[in-house]
Image: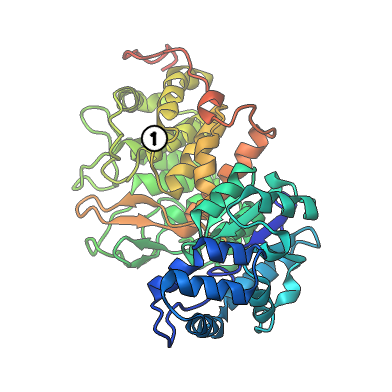
Amino acid sequence: MSSTSNYNTLIFDIGDVLFSWSPQTKTSISPNILRKILSSPTWIDYERGRISQAECYARVGGEFSVSPTEVGRAFQDARDSLQSNDELISVIRHLKERSDGMLHVFAMSNISAPDYEILRTKLADWSLFDNIFTSADVGERKPNLGFYKAVISSTGADPSRTIFVDDKMENVLSARSLGMRGIVFDDHRKVVRALYNLLGDPVERGGQYLTVNAKKLLSVTDNGIFLRENFAQLLILEATNDRGLVNLTDTHRTWNFFQGKPLLTTEEFPFDLDTTSLGLTVMGSPEHVAHSVMDDMLDYIDDDGIIQTYFDHRRPRFDPVVCVNALTLFYSYGRGHQLNRTLHWIREVLLHRAYLDGTRYYTTPECFLYFLGRLLEISNDVYLAAYIKPLLIERIQERIGADGDALALSMRLRLCACLGLRNDVDLRTLLPLQCEDGGWEIGWIYKYGSSGIRIGNRGLTTSMAMKAILEMQQRFPSPPSSPSAVNAVRPVKQAYTTAQSPPERF
C-alpha cells in the first residue's frame, strides 16, 4: 500500500463477493423462490440469531408451502455450490502484503451461525482476515446501521479511511452514509481496478508500467494498427526525461512523423514542421542547426501569413496545433516575431473557440489548449503571455469538468497547473482511469487528416497522467477547503474578449 493512500481498512461482504454460489438446486424449490426465502422476515430473524435453524425451516416451509425437509435439502445444495473467489482473494492478499502491516482486512456478512460454521470448512485463505463479523454474532444485519457501527467500534476503524465492498447497493449506501468509501461489486475487473487505484500510489504504479514497457510504447490506431512514430515518443521523453523509455529516429535536422515506412497514407510521407518543431525543442539541438531549420520553415508560409504543416509545397496544409508548435520553436530562439501573422491567427482561433471540435490533425480541444500553454511556458516571454494568457485562462476554465479521455484530462490538468488553477474535478475523474497494470487507458491525440483514423498511445497517456498528478500535487500541496473544484477555480475577470493587435514588440 502506498504511503500516500488515504485508506488503511478493507471490509468485504462474503456471499456473492468473496464466495459465489448457485440458487439452482436439485429440489422442487426454484431459484426465484429460494431468493425470496433469503429476503423473508423469517430468514432475517434467523441470520440475526433470533431463531434456530429448525424453527426457521419450519416457518419458511409454512410461508412458501414446501416441507421443512425440502427447505433443508435446497440450502444444503446451495452450500455445496459455494466457491471461493480465489482471484479476488489473491488481489486482497497482494494489497495487504505490500502495505507493510498498515492495511487491515475484515469480512462482514449476513449469515446464520450454522451456515457460517459450514462456510469455514470451505477451502479459502481465511488467514487473510484480521476478523470476520457475522450478523448472527452481532445480532444486527446489513443494511441496518447498527451492524456497521458495531464493526467500527470493534475494529477501531476510521470510516473516512475505510473501503467497503458489497454486491448490494443498499448495503453500500449505508456504509457510505457513515463516511466509508463504498464500492458496489457488480463487475470483478472494475472492483479490482478500484482497489489498486485507491490503495496504490498512481505515479509509482504509472512509472512501473512505463519501465516494464520501455522501448515498446508504440502508438496504435483506433482500428488496431500499431505505428512506430516519433511525435508520441518525443512527448513521452519530455514528460519523463527518461531516454531509456523511448525509441526515436536518429536525425540531425528535420523530423518525420513516421519511423520507417509510413502506414495508412502515401508511400512517401514528407518531413513535417510539427514533429520537427517538437524534436528541436525537446532534444535541444545545436543552435546553428535550429536556426538553419527555421530559415527553411519560413519558406512554408502561405499568403495569409500562416505557417504550413509539411516541408512540401505540393501539400498545402495548415493546422492550429502545428502552428503553435512552430511558434514554440521560433520563440525558443528569440525569433517569434517572424511568425507574427501566424500568432495573430492562433489568438483568433482561441478567441472564437474554433478548436472545440478538434483540428484537422488533432482530436480534442485540449490538444490545442495544452500546446498553447506549452508555448507560454517554454518561451517565458512576458509580451506573449500578456497577449495570450488571460484569454487562455478563460478558455481552460470553460473546459473544467467536460467529458474527455485520460489524455484530454491529463492535458487539461497540466495546463491548469501551469496557469495556477486548482482543478480537483478533473483529477478525481482521471485517477480511476488507471488500469490494473499501472498504465492509463489509451487517449487519442491525433488523426489522419484524410481518413479521420485516430492515433493514441498508452505510454503517452500514462506519462502525461503521471506528470499531471505530480504538477497538481506540487502546485497545490494542501487539500481544498471545499470539495468543489468549481469553487476552487475562481472565475477570472473577462479580458481580451475582443480581437486585439499583438503588443508592440510583435
Disc 1 marks a residue whose amino acid type is Val
Residue drawn at 54 percent across, 45 percent down: 286
Image quarter (top left, top right, bottom left or bottom right) of the C terminus: top left
Instruction: Specify whether residue 464 is in view.
Output: yes
Asked where in the image residue 423 lies, by quadrant, the reply is top right
Q: Nearer the viewer, residue 337 or 91?
A: 91
Seen in the image, is 33 located left or right of residue 210?
left
Asked if 94 appears above or below 478 in the picture, the reply is: below
Q: Is residue 436 visible?
A: no
Compare residues 290 and 282 and report the one nearer the observer: 282
Q: Is residue 128 above or below residue 250?
A: below
In the rendered image, residue 311, in percent from the top left (x then y), is placed at 29, 47
Q: Is residue 68 above or below residue 491?
A: below
What color scheme is it?
A: rainbow
Q: Is residue 208 left or right of residue 379?
A: right
Q: Is residue 352 left or right of residue 63?
A: left
Say which quadrant the N terminus sits in: bottom right
Crowd band around label 1 with a 10 angstrom C-alpha radius: few (<14), some (14–19), many (20+): many
Q: Is residue 275 above or below residue 502?
A: below
Counting every numbered tag in the picture gives 1
The foreground one among 131 and 443 is: 131
Residue 214 locus on image (x, y percent): 56, 66
Q: Residue 461's x, y, as percent?
A: 48, 53
List the residue tagged with mark 1.
Answer: 324
